[in-house]
Image (spheres, grey):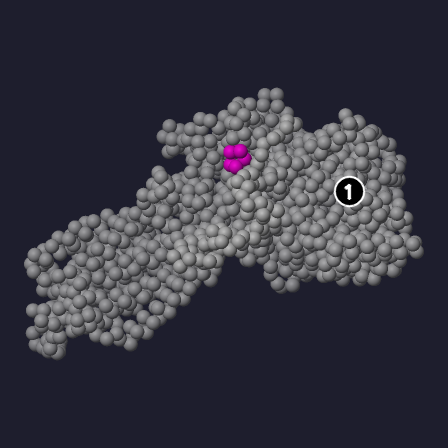
Amino acid sequence: MENNKKRYWRGLEELRNDESFVKHAESEFAELTPGEEKEYQSIVDGTNTHRRDFLKVLGFGMAAVSLAACDAPVTKAVPYLNKPEGEFPTLDNWYASTYSEGSDYSSILVKTREGRPVKLEPNTMSSITHGVSARVQSSLLSLYDIEKLKGPQKGEDTKVSWDMVDREITTQLAQIAGRNGAIRIVSHTVMSPSTKAVIADFIAKYPSTTHIMYDANSLSAIRRANEESFGQPVFPSYDLTKAKVIVGVEADFLGTWVNPGFFDTQYAATRKVSSAPNGKKDMSRHYQFESDFSLTGANADYRAAVKPSQIGLVLTALYNRVATKLGGKTITAPAVEVPYLDKAAADLIAAQGQAVVMCGLNDPAAQVVTNALNSLLGSYGSTIDLSAPLNVHQGNDLAMNAFIDEVKGGRAGAVILYGANPVYDHPRGAELAEALPKVPLSIAISDRADETAGLTKYICPAPHYLESWGDSEPRVGYYSLVQPTISRIFNTRQGQESLLTWAGLPANYHEYLRSYWRRNIFTQGGAGDFDQFWMKALHDGVFERKATTAATASFAGNVDAAASSIARTSAAAGSASGIELIIYEKVGMGTGRWANSPWLQEFPDPMTKATWDNYAKLSKKTAEELGIKQGDLVRVESKGGYAVELPALIQPGLANGTVAVAIGYGRAKAGKAGNGVGVNVYPMATFVGGFLSFYPGNVNVTNTGGYRELAQTQTHETVMSRESVIQETILSAYQKNNAAGRFIPEVETSEGPVVAPDLSLWNGHKYPNHSWGMVIDLNSCTGCGSCVISCQAENNVPVVGRQEVTRRREMHWIRIDRYYSSDAEEGDFQGQEIASENPAVVFQPMLCQHCSNAPCETVCPVAATTHSHEGLNQMTYNRCVGTRYCANNCPYKVRRFNWFKYFDNDNFDYHFNNDLGKMVINPEVTVRSRGVIEKCSFCVQRIQEGKLTAKKERRRPIDGEIVTACAQSCPTSAIVFGDLNDPTSLVHQLTLVERKGGRGFQVIEEINTRPQITYLVKVKNVDPDASATLDEEGEIKTPHTVDT
Amino acid sequence: MHVTSPVRPPLVTGGKTYADVTEDVCRHVEGKPTKEWKIAFIAALVVLIYGTACLFWTWWEGLGVWGLNKTVGWAWDITNFVWWVGIGHAGTLISAILLLFRQKWRTSINRAAEAMTIFAVICAASFILMHMGRPWLAYWALPLPNTFGSLWVNFNSPLVWDVFAISTYFSVSLVFWYIGLIPDLATIRDRAQNKVSRFIYGTFAMGWNGSAKTWSRYEYISLILAGLSTPLVLSVHTIVSMDFATSVIPGWHTTIFPPYFVAGAIFSGFAMVQNLMLITRVVYRLEDYITIEHIESMNKIITLTGSIVGIAYLTEFFIAWYSGVEYESYAFINRATGPYWWAYWAMMTCNVISPQLFWSRSLRRSVTWTFFISVIVNIGMWFERFVIIVTSLHRDYLPSSWAMFSPTFYDIGDYIFSFGLFGTLFLLFSKYLPVVNMAEVKAIIRSSSERLPKNISGVAKGARVANPSFNKDAE
């Protein structure tokens, strides 16, 4: 430093150095002499005011008061005077993280704005998951759930400090451990290796501790069966991309089984076809044998509905058919009348080594037969991998049952419920609820005082995963990190830190996690030094060891014993005439963990399109036999005497003689949104041979005479043979003709027939620069609904509640239309309204089509909806006066009206009605006021942001840089968005290939709306009807064609 | 002057003299309100207050209090709007088109019919405001210069055409009605007993002095306004029909709509005139002015327009089938056999079958039957609009969005509001303004009044009962 000789003065007085200054220089507040006082005191102080200043003071006072009144005080805004590093107001920050909850897993990117997470997107670095499911996206909203606990509590009401909690718990734990009392940690599946290490450390401190894992939707039989069959108690991983034939037996692997995120991308890869000259023209063939009509069944080429008691026999029958041909050992099992068994067996045999059978039953015997079948088919080492298994479903039903017995017997000294809620989600929850308060020390590490936590002595609230550190290993060798994206909102502490504290270890889990990774994961092939490795892992979100090739495995299980066990179970399950209960999981709600998320509650079930409820699904035939109609309140009573009353829903395709009810509902202490929605059917589940079974056999179903209207977003089930809405074909036809199944509407003119859109009144629009468009492949859309919630999060779509959904006023900007096939002939409109008994299903995502000749634009009196020169149909909310003419005139019915004010309104007490919940609002998107129309904007905010970024960098936007929320979340890339004017874009290429002579069509083309969205014809890999033939065009000719 | 053919029945019965006309009509304006009027007025006011409360809540909470949904964006609101506009057609038709056709029988009914028109259009306009999500911004539908720069209304939109059509129709009707009132207002002014009414009626009479020149101007302006109004009668409902016809919704997108809507409007308008006049003539004892001949003439028009409407219904069905358009065919099959079949058949019964009863002379000359069928016709025409709007919307292109509409308490309450408004206005009119156009009736007394036999004298001949009570100062 150079010598700084500059002098600074505090004021001219100091410079002048006059006497009075020097005298007071040391004291902070100078006492002034009376003479000076007069000089220094201002009139504003109000002291010593001169008569002549009166008006001045008065005037100033008036002005000050009126100025103060002008501006409402801003109380809590903190200006970015000290800007946090890397934080730019109005710019997004992205962090890689992981959603890992029980067996649910998703590698995600978290978008934060001004320090708060506002959106979850898939992490493209992960090779495990590729989309963000509705449930994962909804977990974002749970971060801002106002009803979470705000600090530690003793019992349900007394708020205490962490110090006090720790002191009391540590003392009691030491006492219990000292007398060797049983300490039990109960959790769902833990896929986090470091958490397991924390628990191990805890156990080291208190050796009488056991960690018990259980799953509400248990599949513990799979590990048991693999132990028996291969000596490895693991959950295999699957590679469906290698599969030519997929047989699902009660395994809803696209909807709820294990984690659909593992399978849907792989599955869709086998289902995509292309009309390009050398495009892929083969598909996997998918058979599904199931009792409930699952999302997977809806996607299957062949589906058979089987009663739960017969499901096991399907496996044995399939096994025998395959074994006879492939020289395996046949087994004795009762015969079963199920269609497509022979066909499935033949296809499986033909696809040896490229086939897979997946079984969703939590029955070791059924899983052993499945393993035997897969072994025969040579699936191990190809489609199934035991060497890099999944870490899902580690729950052990037997251990959990033993634990409940222990608590009931008063043998448990301390119980730590780590994120688990067994009082609600375990069939023996009621027993536990009775016994738990008697346990000397009970602690819940939970985010709210739920059914279980409410009964414990201490509740140690854990933060949301977006506020936490953590890791996960969904598949052996595939790690991912969880990092906080917001500082903790409430006075919470991670469960790991609580356990470390009680174990007397340093309670810094972040450090613990780092050192765990340094010791265990970095050593598995991390590059550079650890800090670099750590930063990269944090940045990427994932660390994946080099993929190993799947190992083959030789089956050593006892098929005969398994077969006889299946036969026994089947016989015991119920008489043929009774109504069997199916307990199933819903795609959105899952096990009920996130029941307080209004997004999830209002998420329409992909199959039933019902929201805000669970219900008793009955097939049409069964319902008629029981005298039950849709919406009738029925009473379902299990053999054990547990009864629930819930509305009936007619589900075409459900096995006759069954009733299906979903878990995840009937929460008592989830919060405002989740409480009292539906009924809890966990208590109806049973244990067969110690394994949780969702098929408790026969139940009594009676009509109570009551009625409850179901909140469905779609009530009409069939497409009424409207070929310009849904176009589909079969694979063999498509292989002959790319345009098979296309319906090209023609109009008669004096010069002969013309293709409808060739006649137009309109001049059309010019899109000189960009032309934003979309391609939606009906063939790879599984109907999962990820896009619906993704759009809701991105575009601040309000939640309207059950009552409003019954009035058909849900606000979702994108919906998935689900159509069942009908057996009725064309022209029989009444008949066509009724779905087939086992219908084929088509899902069609429907959003604003951004028509180039938009019917909505011409009718708006105030020009609130206009056309952009980039192909967008724009909606100007603040110009809208709300005549709703546009909504009426929209042929796709995608416009939504704000019937009420949905924010700050106690009638809509969801997240828009409290300050915390509002933090999820995307600041880029207006929250719409009452009385205006809204609709899909093609995420215009993203388009704008992408264009600006490109412009700043003096380049064109790159394909894939601008993606709508729906397309981004889609796990199967069924939705492709981009610039149709950009020749390198995927959407341009797809349109080019498919529009002319390919699969591309626009919905209701004949009204000449010219949408920017092209749909691709759905192709099913089924054989043509025996009676039908294919002509050279690939058109299906049936002997009795209907005269049109 | 025109000479009425002697075979025609007289248009005014009872051998009325000029003085009788004045006396019979002014009696109600000048006298104290009768008990019947008071009861009716209080009833109307109560209905209006109730409806206003409903309307207030609709605006306070939002349109969600109605039964509309994402699929059916219009239902009772626009049904009521079109229904009231339709009713508002008869008045101008009677005063304008019938004037041009020199139909003298219109003179007794045109005043009340025009008043009805104006009030009906006010009711219709209230639904335009009501159906908006943000009614406080309704003025944005007007092409006003504004701070938004070049942002104007969308001239492509039929709703903007509506704004012009309805506002033009309303202003022309109002002017026409008012001009017609001036000679009568002057009569009342001249007879006024107190200063207040003399001042008020005098002000509105605009210095009418009954000179030949004023009469000549009056005739001219009436003719001009009749000429102006005539196309309006046709254009208003044509444009209202375009709200539907220019859309893409099957069941709306139909070229037959303009004539069909106009016929329907006249049909319902005449039915409403019948209802009102039948009550008024009894309550005000105007049987001599509004005779069975009037009723019969109007019933003939009801039958004619009802038949046009019926043919239009059948034509729609034929075209739906003949066009081969899948969606349109379905829309019409769905109307007749779908979930709203009852609305469709209510419409068919009321509008197509009931007016055909008037082929019977005794029925069309029966006051009771006329009143009854007029009510039925108005119900039927309400259903027609409901059928067109709701059954077309509820099942359009994509079956996934098909939905049902059911009205709520507020749908009904807001409809009731319009009845309260209409009733209140009409009762005020019938008390404070002459319900029959005295001046024009006097003009036909010479040619079309019933001649009584010479041997009849006294009241029956038209002798005055009491001294005339008009204001002598005016002379």
The residue stretch that appears in magenta: A940-945
B453 w.r.t. B82: above or below: below
Type of secondary structure dominating the magenta stretch: helix
Quadrant for residue B267, please give it.
Answer: bottom left
Residue A709 magenta-highlighted: no
> Which quadrant of the figure contains the N terminus of chain B?
bottom left
Residue at the spot of label 1: A509
> Which quadrant of the figure contains the C terminus of chain B?
bottom left
- List x then y, in percent, for residue B4: 11, 60
- Using the image, name the chain to which the residue with label 1 belongs: A
Residue at 23 percent across and 48 percent down: it is B231
Quadrant for residue B147, please give it.
Answer: top left
Label 1 residue SS: helix
Residue at 46 percent across and 31 percent down: it is A870
- List x then y, in percent, for residue A631: 60, 57
- List x then y, in percent, for residue A182: 89, 54
A61 to the left or right of A20: left
A167 w.r.t. A105: above or below: below
Q: Dot 1, crowdedness within 10 Å: few (<14), some or many (≥20)?
A: many
Please say whether residue A923 is visible from this viewpoint.
Answer: no
The three-letter code of the residue at mark 1 reads Tyr
A246 to the left or right of A939: right
A496 w.r.t. A780: above or below: below
